[in-house]
Image (tube, grey):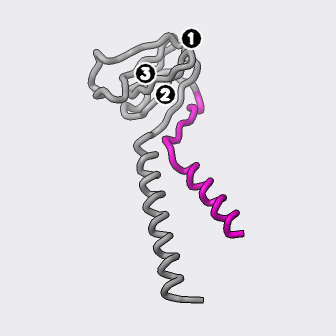
């Protein structure tokens, strides 16, 4: 019983980590929030951009390692060649992972203390 519960908890916690990449509900045109990270897939490869602008015929953005003010860094792809667009937040995924690891150690410490302080 304990093993099944531990396995289920591990799977649920592992799903909580990560960037939370998801497809936008609608494929609208316009500018996304400047700090929104976007993964654009084309011909089997993906690039990660920020400050993305979607128009009727193209998708453009700035590579996520460049400052969002770098307009000379902006790259564009024809919209017809883009396979998919996904939105995510790798920074939030990092902090979720830090919280998960910290919470696991705190929980293990509480279980250890509970067993030592209140023997059954």
72 sits to left or right of 54: left
Residue at 44% across / 27% down in the picture?
48
Answer few, some or many: residues within 10 Å of disc 2's Cα (few below 14, many 20 plus, some between 14 and 19). many
The disc at residue 80 is 1
Closer mark to the observer between disc 2 and disc 3: 2
Helix, strand or loop under label 2: strand
The disc at residue 39 is 2
Closer mark to the observer between disc 1 and disc 3: 1
Residue 29 vs residue 74, the one in the foreground: 74
Residue 59 vs residue 112, the one in the foreground: 112
Image height of 16 relative to 120, above or below: above
Tell me the distance, in whole angstroms, between the alpha carbons under discs 1 and 3: 15 Å
The segment highlighted magenta reads 1-26
Residue 61 vs residue 28, the one in the foreground: 61
Location of residue 64 in the rendering, given as x and y in whole percent from the top left corner = 37, 29
Dot 1 or dot 3: first in sequence order is 3
Location of residue 77 in the rendering, given as x and y in whole percent from the top left corner = 47, 13
Q: Count how many numbered circles sit on residues in the image.
A: 3
Helix, strand or loop under label 1: helix
Residue 119 quadrant: bottom right
Dot 1 or dot 2: first in sequence order is 2
Residue at 54% across / 17% down in the picture?
42
72 sits to left or right of 12: left
The residue tagged 3 is: 53
């Amino acid at each position: 019983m304990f093993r099944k519960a531990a396995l289920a908890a591990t799977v649920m916690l592992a799903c909580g980590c990560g960037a939370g990449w998801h497809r936008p509900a609608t494929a609208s045109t316009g500018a996304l929030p400047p700090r929104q990270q976007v993964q654009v897939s084309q011909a089997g490869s993906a690039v990660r951009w920020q400050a993305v602008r979607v128009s009727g015929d193209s998708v453009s953005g700035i590579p996520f390692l460049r400052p969002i003010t770098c307009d000379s860094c902006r790259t564009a792809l024809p919209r017809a060649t883009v396979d998919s667009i996904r939105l995510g937040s790798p920074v939030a995924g990092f902090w979720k992972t830090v919280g998960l690891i910290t919470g696991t150690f705190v929980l293990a410490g509480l279980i250890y203390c509970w067993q030592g302080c209140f023997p059954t």
